[in-house]
Protein backbone atom coordinates (compact mmCIF):
# COMPACT_ATOMS: atom_id res chain seq x y z
CA UNK A 1 0.00 0.00 0.00
CA UNK A 2 2.84 2.39 0.80
CA UNK A 3 4.33 1.99 -2.69
CA UNK A 4 0.95 2.67 -4.28
CA UNK A 5 0.49 5.78 -2.15
CA UNK A 6 3.99 6.99 -2.96
CA UNK A 7 3.39 6.37 -6.66
CA UNK A 8 0.13 8.36 -6.60
CA UNK A 9 1.70 11.23 -4.65
CA UNK A 10 4.67 11.36 -7.01
CA UNK A 11 2.41 11.27 -10.07
CA UNK A 12 0.44 14.25 -8.75
CA UNK A 13 3.66 16.14 -8.01
CA UNK A 14 5.12 15.43 -11.46
CA UNK A 15 1.88 16.57 -13.10
CA UNK A 16 1.89 19.78 -11.05
CA UNK A 17 5.51 20.45 -11.94
CA UNK A 18 4.70 19.86 -15.60
CA UNK A 19 1.78 22.27 -15.46
CA UNK A 20 3.74 24.99 -13.67
CA UNK A 21 6.66 24.57 -16.06
CA UNK A 22 4.38 25.33 -19.02
CA UNK A 23 3.39 28.65 -17.46
CA UNK A 24 5.53 31.80 -17.27
CA UNK A 25 7.21 32.18 -13.85
CA UNK A 26 4.92 34.97 -12.63
CA UNK A 27 1.76 33.16 -13.77
CA UNK A 28 2.91 29.88 -12.24
CA UNK A 29 3.65 31.64 -8.95
CA UNK A 30 0.25 33.36 -8.89
CA UNK A 31 -1.54 30.10 -9.73
CA UNK A 32 0.24 28.16 -7.00
CA UNK A 33 -0.46 30.90 -4.49
CA UNK A 34 -4.14 31.00 -5.38
CA UNK A 35 -4.55 27.24 -4.98
CA UNK A 36 -2.99 27.02 -1.52
CA UNK A 37 -4.41 30.35 -0.34
CA UNK A 38 -7.87 29.02 -1.18
CA UNK A 39 -7.53 25.49 0.21
CA UNK A 40 -4.87 25.76 2.92
CA UNK A 41 -6.72 27.77 5.60
CA UNK A 42 -9.49 25.14 5.58
CA UNK A 43 -7.09 22.28 6.33
CA UNK A 44 -6.67 20.90 9.85
CA UNK A 45 -2.94 21.63 9.82
CA UNK A 46 -3.77 25.35 9.82
CA UNK A 47 -4.63 25.01 13.50
CA UNK A 48 -0.95 24.32 14.18
CA UNK A 49 0.06 27.39 12.19
CA UNK A 50 -2.41 29.60 14.07
CA UNK A 51 -1.19 28.25 17.40
CA UNK A 52 2.38 29.12 16.44
CA UNK A 53 1.37 32.61 15.31
CA UNK A 54 -0.35 33.21 18.65
CA UNK A 55 2.62 31.96 20.65
CA UNK A 56 5.20 34.01 18.77
CA UNK A 57 3.12 37.13 18.11
CA UNK A 58 0.60 37.45 20.96
CA UNK A 59 -1.91 40.26 20.97
CA UNK A 60 -2.79 40.27 17.28
CA UNK A 61 -6.39 40.66 16.22
CA UNK A 62 -8.22 37.69 14.71
CA UNK A 63 -8.20 39.50 11.37
CA UNK A 64 -4.43 39.96 11.48
CA UNK A 65 -3.90 36.31 12.42
CA UNK A 66 -5.98 35.22 9.45
CA UNK A 67 -4.11 37.61 7.16
CA UNK A 68 -0.81 36.05 8.19
CA UNK A 69 -2.24 32.54 7.81
CA UNK A 70 -3.56 33.22 4.29
CA UNK A 71 -0.30 34.91 3.35
CA UNK A 72 1.69 31.92 4.59
CA UNK A 73 -0.38 29.54 2.45
CA UNK A 74 -0.07 31.88 -0.52
CA UNK A 75 3.71 31.96 -0.12
CA UNK A 76 3.94 28.17 0.24
CA UNK A 77 1.96 27.60 -2.95
CA UNK A 78 4.19 30.03 -4.78
CA UNK A 79 7.32 28.21 -3.55
CA UNK A 80 5.98 24.93 -4.96
CA UNK A 81 4.99 26.50 -8.28
CA UNK A 82 8.36 28.24 -8.61
CA UNK A 83 10.44 25.05 -8.41
CA UNK A 84 10.43 24.44 -12.20
CA UNK A 85 11.51 28.08 -12.73
CA UNK A 86 14.24 28.36 -10.08
CA UNK A 87 17.01 29.04 -12.56
CA UNK A 88 15.14 31.82 -14.37
CA UNK A 89 13.81 33.39 -11.17
CA UNK A 90 17.16 33.30 -9.38
CA UNK A 91 18.99 34.78 -12.37
CA UNK A 92 16.52 37.33 -13.75
CA UNK A 93 14.06 38.12 -10.96
CA UNK A 94 16.31 38.28 -7.88
CA UNK A 95 18.27 41.35 -6.80
CA UNK A 96 21.07 41.59 -4.24
CA UNK A 97 20.90 44.57 -1.91
CA UNK A 98 24.38 46.04 -1.74
CA UNK A 99 25.60 44.18 -4.80
CA UNK A 100 29.14 45.55 -4.43
CA UNK A 101 29.41 43.97 -0.97
CA UNK A 102 28.61 40.58 -2.47
CA UNK A 103 31.15 41.10 -5.25
CA UNK A 104 33.85 42.10 -2.76
CA UNK A 105 33.16 39.15 -0.49
CA UNK A 106 33.18 36.53 -3.22
CA UNK A 107 36.40 37.96 -4.64
CA UNK A 108 38.20 36.67 -1.52
CA UNK A 109 37.28 33.02 -2.16
CA UNK A 110 37.31 32.39 1.59
CA UNK A 111 35.01 29.74 3.10
CA UNK A 112 31.82 30.92 4.77
CA UNK A 113 28.63 29.65 6.34
CA UNK A 114 25.39 31.29 5.20
CA UNK A 115 22.30 30.99 7.39
CA UNK A 116 18.69 31.80 6.66
CA UNK A 117 15.16 30.58 7.38
CA UNK A 118 12.07 29.18 5.68
CA UNK A 119 11.08 32.67 4.57
CA UNK A 120 9.93 33.81 1.14
CA UNK A 121 11.25 31.20 -1.33
CA UNK A 122 14.03 29.58 0.68
CA UNK A 123 15.30 27.72 -2.39
CA UNK A 124 16.40 30.98 -4.05
CA UNK A 125 19.55 31.54 -1.96
CA UNK A 126 21.75 28.80 -3.36
CA UNK A 127 20.33 29.11 -6.86
CA UNK A 128 20.96 32.88 -7.07
CA UNK A 129 24.53 32.59 -5.82
CA UNK A 130 25.19 30.11 -8.61
CA UNK A 131 23.33 31.84 -11.45
CA UNK A 132 24.56 35.37 -10.63
CA UNK A 133 28.00 34.81 -9.08
CA UNK A 134 28.95 31.33 -10.26
CA UNK A 135 29.41 30.30 -6.61
CA UNK A 136 28.28 26.91 -5.32
CA UNK A 137 26.89 26.73 -1.79
CA UNK A 138 26.63 23.23 -0.34
CA UNK A 139 23.17 22.75 1.14
CA UNK A 140 21.50 20.30 3.49
CA UNK A 141 17.83 19.36 3.43
CA UNK A 142 15.39 16.84 4.82
CA UNK A 143 14.52 14.48 1.98
CA UNK A 144 10.85 13.45 1.63
CA UNK A 145 10.07 9.86 2.58
CA UNK A 146 8.70 9.33 -0.93
CA UNK A 147 11.77 8.43 -3.04
CA UNK A 148 10.20 9.47 -6.36
CA UNK A 149 9.17 12.87 -5.02
CA UNK A 150 12.60 13.22 -3.40
CA UNK A 151 14.34 12.75 -6.75
CA UNK A 152 12.20 15.39 -8.45
CA UNK A 153 12.68 17.96 -5.69
CA UNK A 154 16.42 17.25 -5.50
CA UNK A 155 16.82 17.84 -9.22
CA UNK A 156 14.82 21.08 -9.04
CA UNK A 157 16.57 22.62 -6.01
CA UNK A 158 20.04 21.71 -7.31
CA UNK A 159 19.34 23.11 -10.80
CA UNK A 160 19.85 19.73 -12.38
CA UNK A 161 22.65 18.67 -10.06
CA UNK A 162 24.81 21.81 -10.33
CA UNK A 163 24.34 22.80 -6.66
CA UNK A 164 25.77 20.34 -4.11
CA UNK A 165 22.95 19.30 -1.76
CA UNK A 166 23.00 16.63 0.92
CA UNK A 167 20.03 14.92 2.58
CA UNK A 168 20.37 15.20 6.36
CA UNK A 169 22.27 12.09 7.46
CA UNK A 170 25.38 11.36 9.49
CA UNK A 171 27.33 11.11 6.26
CA UNK A 172 26.22 14.58 5.20
CA UNK A 173 27.94 16.08 8.25
CA UNK A 174 31.24 14.63 7.10
CA UNK A 175 30.69 16.01 3.59
CA UNK A 176 30.00 19.50 4.97
CA UNK A 177 33.11 19.47 7.13
CA UNK A 178 35.15 18.45 4.11
CA UNK A 179 33.61 21.31 2.13
CA UNK A 180 34.70 23.89 4.71
CA UNK A 181 38.12 22.31 4.96
CA UNK A 182 38.42 22.73 1.19
CA UNK A 183 37.42 26.41 1.39
CA UNK A 184 33.87 26.10 0.05
CA UNK A 185 30.57 27.64 1.17
CA UNK A 186 27.83 26.05 3.28
CA UNK A 187 24.16 27.02 3.58
CA UNK A 188 21.84 26.21 6.49
CA UNK A 189 18.19 26.96 7.25
CA UNK A 190 18.30 27.19 11.03
CA UNK A 191 14.64 27.75 11.98
CA UNK A 192 13.53 24.12 12.36
CA UNK A 193 13.26 22.15 15.59
CA UNK A 194 16.15 19.78 16.33
CA UNK A 195 15.47 17.53 19.31
CA UNK A 196 19.15 16.81 19.94
CA UNK A 197 20.14 20.46 19.73
CA UNK A 198 20.53 23.33 22.19
CA UNK A 199 17.62 25.04 23.92
CA UNK A 200 17.67 28.78 23.20
CA UNK A 201 14.75 31.26 23.31
CA UNK A 202 13.04 31.96 19.99
CA UNK A 203 10.38 34.67 20.28
CA UNK A 204 10.89 34.34 24.03
CA UNK A 205 10.04 30.63 24.05
CA UNK A 206 12.64 27.91 24.55
CA UNK A 207 13.31 26.15 21.22
CA UNK A 208 15.66 23.31 20.34
CA UNK A 209 18.07 24.35 17.58
CA UNK A 210 20.93 22.57 15.85
CA UNK A 211 24.23 24.36 16.69
CA UNK A 212 26.31 22.44 14.15
CA UNK A 213 26.80 25.45 11.86
CA UNK A 214 28.37 27.39 14.74
CA UNK A 215 30.68 24.57 15.74
CA UNK A 216 31.84 24.14 12.14
CA UNK A 217 32.48 27.87 11.70
CA UNK A 218 34.38 28.14 14.98
CA UNK A 219 36.46 25.09 14.11
CA UNK A 220 37.53 26.49 10.74
CA UNK A 221 37.38 30.17 11.76
CA UNK A 222 35.07 31.24 8.95
CA UNK A 223 32.24 33.80 9.13
CA UNK A 224 28.58 32.95 9.72
CA UNK A 225 26.60 35.34 7.52
CA UNK A 226 22.81 35.76 7.82
CA UNK A 227 21.12 36.20 4.43
CA UNK A 228 17.63 37.68 4.35
CA UNK A 229 15.28 36.75 1.52
CA UNK A 230 12.22 38.93 0.85
CA UNK A 231 9.47 38.25 -1.66
CA UNK A 232 8.83 41.58 -3.38
CA UNK A 233 6.09 41.13 -5.96
CA UNK A 234 5.00 37.65 -6.96
CA UNK A 235 8.05 35.80 -8.26
CA UNK A 236 10.55 38.60 -7.56
CA UNK A 237 13.00 38.60 -4.64
CA UNK A 238 15.60 40.62 -2.79
CA UNK A 239 18.55 39.06 -0.95
CA UNK A 240 20.50 40.95 1.69
CA UNK A 241 23.73 40.09 3.53
CA UNK A 242 23.87 40.92 7.24
CA UNK A 243 26.93 41.43 9.42
CA UNK A 244 28.57 38.12 10.39
CA UNK A 245 27.62 36.72 13.79
CA UNK A 246 30.13 37.17 16.60
CA UNK A 247 31.78 33.78 17.12
CA UNK A 248 34.80 34.61 19.28
CA UNK A 249 35.51 36.75 22.33
CA UNK A 250 38.04 39.59 22.27
CA UNK A 251 40.78 37.23 23.43
CA UNK A 252 40.00 34.81 20.59
CA UNK A 253 38.16 32.16 22.61
CA UNK A 254 35.07 30.59 21.00
CA UNK A 255 31.86 32.03 22.42
CA UNK A 256 29.32 29.58 23.90
CA UNK A 257 27.08 28.24 21.14
CA UNK A 258 24.05 29.34 23.18
CA UNK A 259 25.18 32.97 22.93
CA UNK A 260 25.74 32.76 19.18
CA UNK A 261 22.40 31.01 18.67
CA UNK A 262 20.65 33.72 20.67
CA UNK A 263 22.08 36.33 18.31
CA UNK A 264 21.08 34.26 15.27
CA UNK A 265 17.55 33.83 16.62
CA UNK A 266 17.27 37.58 17.21
CA UNK A 267 18.14 38.19 13.54
CA UNK A 268 15.53 35.67 12.39
CA UNK A 269 12.89 37.13 14.69
CA UNK A 270 13.43 40.54 13.12
CA UNK A 271 12.95 39.13 9.62
CA UNK A 272 9.79 37.25 10.61
CA UNK A 273 8.26 40.25 12.37
CA UNK A 274 8.96 42.31 9.24
CA UNK A 275 7.18 39.83 6.94
CA UNK A 276 5.28 37.31 9.11
CA UNK A 277 3.17 36.10 6.19
CA UNK A 278 6.33 34.89 4.42
CA UNK A 279 7.44 32.48 7.17
CA UNK A 280 6.46 28.80 7.25
CA UNK A 281 4.42 28.69 10.47
CA UNK A 282 3.59 25.01 9.98
CA UNK A 283 6.79 23.79 11.68
CA UNK A 284 6.48 22.21 15.13
CA UNK A 285 9.03 24.76 16.30
CA UNK A 286 8.27 24.88 20.02
CA UNK A 287 7.43 22.18 22.58
CA UNK A 288 3.73 21.41 22.74
CA UNK A 289 1.76 21.27 25.96
CA UNK A 290 1.98 17.46 25.78
CA UNK A 291 5.77 17.69 25.51
CA UNK A 292 5.91 19.87 28.61
CA UNK A 293 3.61 17.48 30.48
CA UNK A 294 5.89 14.53 29.66
CA UNK A 295 8.96 16.49 30.80
CA UNK A 296 7.26 17.37 34.10
CA UNK A 297 6.26 13.75 34.66
CA UNK A 298 9.80 12.55 33.88
CA UNK A 299 11.31 14.98 36.37
Image (spheres, grey):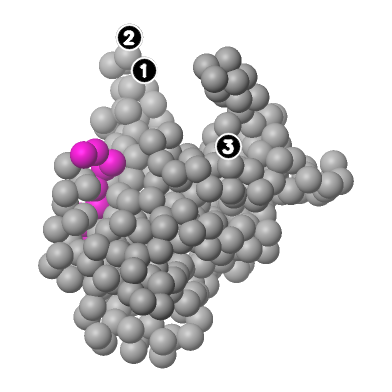
Q: Secondary structure at mark 3?
A: loop
Q: Are marks 3 and 1 in contact (CB under 8 Å)?
A: no
The residue sitting at the front extreme is 251
Range shown magenta:
161-170
Q: Secondary structure at mark 1?
A: helix
Give the mark, 2 or 3, whose residue is nearer the N terminus: 2
**Looking at the picture, how far across and down is residue 176, in whole percent?**
21, 55
Q: Position of residue 17 (x, y in %)?
A: 39, 44
Q: Is residue 81 positioned above or below 208 on the image?
A: below
- Residue 40 seen in this snapshot: yes
Residue 20, how many percent across, how many down?
A: 44, 49
In reply to whether residue 278 is colored magenta, the answer given is no
Q: Nearer the viewer, mark 3 or mark 1?
A: 3
Position of 177 with respect to 235 (left or right) is: left
Which type of secondary structure does the marked residue at label 2 adopt? Answer: loop
Q: Which residue is mark 1?
A: 5
Question: Residue shown at 39%/26% (left/top)?
Answer: 9
The quarter in which the N terminus is drawn is top left
User: Which mark, residue 281?
Assistant: none
**Residue 178, percent from left and from top:** 14, 58
Residue 1 image label? 2
Report the residue marked by disc 3: 286
186 left or right, relative to 243:
left
Q: Residue at x 17, y 71 (%)?
A: 183
Nearest the viewer among 14 and 187 is 187
For marks 3 and 1, the one nearer the N-term is 1
In the picture, measured across the screen, residue 213 lies left or right of residue 163, that is right
Relative to 3, say whether 250 is above or below.
below
The residue lying toward the viewer, choosing from 188 and 194, is: 194
Point 69% across, 46% down: residue: 56
Q: Is residue 28 above or below residue 130?
A: above
Which picture quadrant has residue 225?
bottom left
Amino acid sequence: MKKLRYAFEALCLYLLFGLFKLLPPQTASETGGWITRTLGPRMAVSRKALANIRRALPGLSAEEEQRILRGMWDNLGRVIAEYPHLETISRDRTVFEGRSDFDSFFATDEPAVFISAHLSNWEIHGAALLTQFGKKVELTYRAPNNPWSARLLHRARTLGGRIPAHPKTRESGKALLEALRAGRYLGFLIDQKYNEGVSVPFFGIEAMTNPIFIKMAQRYKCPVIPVQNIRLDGACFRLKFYEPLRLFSEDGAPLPVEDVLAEAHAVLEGWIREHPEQWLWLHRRWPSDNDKKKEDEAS
